[in-house]
Image (spheres, helix red, strand yellow):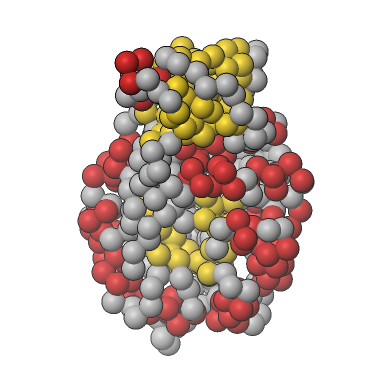
Amino acid sequence: MYVKQPPMGWNTWNTFGPEISDRMIRESADAMIDQGLRDAGYEYVVIDDCWSKRERDPETGKLVADPEKFPNGMKSVADYIHEKGLKFGMYSCCGVRTCANYPGSFDHEFLDAETFAEFGCDFLKYDNCFRPASANSPLLYQRMGTALSMCGRDILYSACNWGSDDVWSWIRSAGAHMYRSTGDILDNFKSFTDIAASQYDKKLAASAPNCFNDMDMLTVGMFGNGNVGTSGCTEEEYRTQFALWCMASTPLMLGCDIRKMTKETKDIVTNRALIEINQDPDCRPPFLLNNQGERKTYAKRLANGDFAILFLNFSDKERNGYAYFEEMGVTAASGYRVQMTDLFTGEEREPAREFTTVSVPEHGCRIYRAKLVR
Ligand code: GAL
């Protein structure tokens, strides 16, 4: 299986935690279509932790769906999702139990991979709790990588060891298509900006097609509600989160209740111009153009020769952001000017030479697509 672009979808964990059910999943699959998410490129409907019975089937040793949450079984949920033209994701863990204390796949990797294939699963998120002390993380991720590749079905392998053990240095060789690079996101400004800061500048260079750095599920649109809801974020902060995730070409896995998004949330997460930046076929990492501490400017080189430019202002007042085009290789002697289009408002700026200044809202961003023109 070859995963060319950062996967896009929705995952239950951020909003629902353990409160998952057949009905809620079907309604969310419906929402993927009714809210225009499928048309914008979102594809995977992923059930996170807490879907199984507390113990394996005593006779077959297999994982079994909790009959109270999923009275029709998992295959029926998968069929429903597939009928909608979507793909189905599930969750397990490389330790003996999952993080929420359900059976994990340790020593059952091959049986479980076959079970996920029987369920009709297209995506497996694989967590890192309750590992026996003698079993190191790279080895256990290798095992599931092999089990998935032998299970007879294409299953996208989404590793989740929270960035531990220098995951970026070995996870591609374990067969993963994406890998969590940080601890869990919470729905507040500090959490998502800390996550981005920990990956931008250095770690994103190892992220590329077929094995993407995953900065965790988005909290855009949660407004403090649900399982990882804390203080919540403002709309401006959510725009900034989405822009940071797009520039990083990190998977776009929504985490809000997609059945009940506000218009503003929908506008953010279905912004085609931004999604194009995220899905750019080259998936090149952003690089720093200007650093003023709480204000930073990043650029990302795109496959067609354009750049994306992101101005960030993490201070608590509106401030100017700067971009020096020299840092993008656009010298004054080249004769090129840089023409920027705002990806949230569509506003086009006058082509500029050498540098530009942009006013950036507090805890906010401005993001542009930039063309070189003579
Ligand atoms: C964490 C993981 C979360 C979620 C949770 C489920 O380890 O990072 O994204 O899957 O476990 O218990």
The relative height of residue 350 versus residue 195 in the rendered view (above or below) is above
Q: Quadrant of residue 126?
A: bottom left
User: Horizontally, is 113 left or right of 24 in the view?
Assistant: left
On the image, the x and y values in percent for residue 260 come to 76, 53
Q: Quadrant of the N terminus?
A: bottom left
Q: Position of residue 120 (x, y in %)?
A: 49, 78
Q: Is residue 12 visible?
A: no
Q: How many numbered discs, if any?
A: 0
Residue at (29, 65) in percent of width and height: 145
Residue 274 placement, left or right of 123:
right
Residue positioned 38% across, 78% down in the render: 153
Expressed as whole percent of the image width and height from the top left, the position of residue 230 reads 65, 37
Q: Can you name the residue that lies furthest to the bottom here?
A: 59
Q: Is 13 drawn above or below residue 187 in the view shown?
A: below
| Residue most extreme to the front | 374
Q: Nearer the viewer, residue 24 or 363?
A: 363
Q: Quadrant of the C terminus?
A: top left
Asked whether 155 or 38 is in front, the reply is: 38
Q: Which quadrant of the figure has residue 24?
A: bottom right
**For the point 57% across and 58% down, which residue is it?**
42
| Residue 28: x %, y % from top left | 68, 63
Q: Is residue 87 visible?
A: yes
Between 242 and 120, the one nearer to me in the picture = 242
Left or right: where 11 falls relative to 178: right
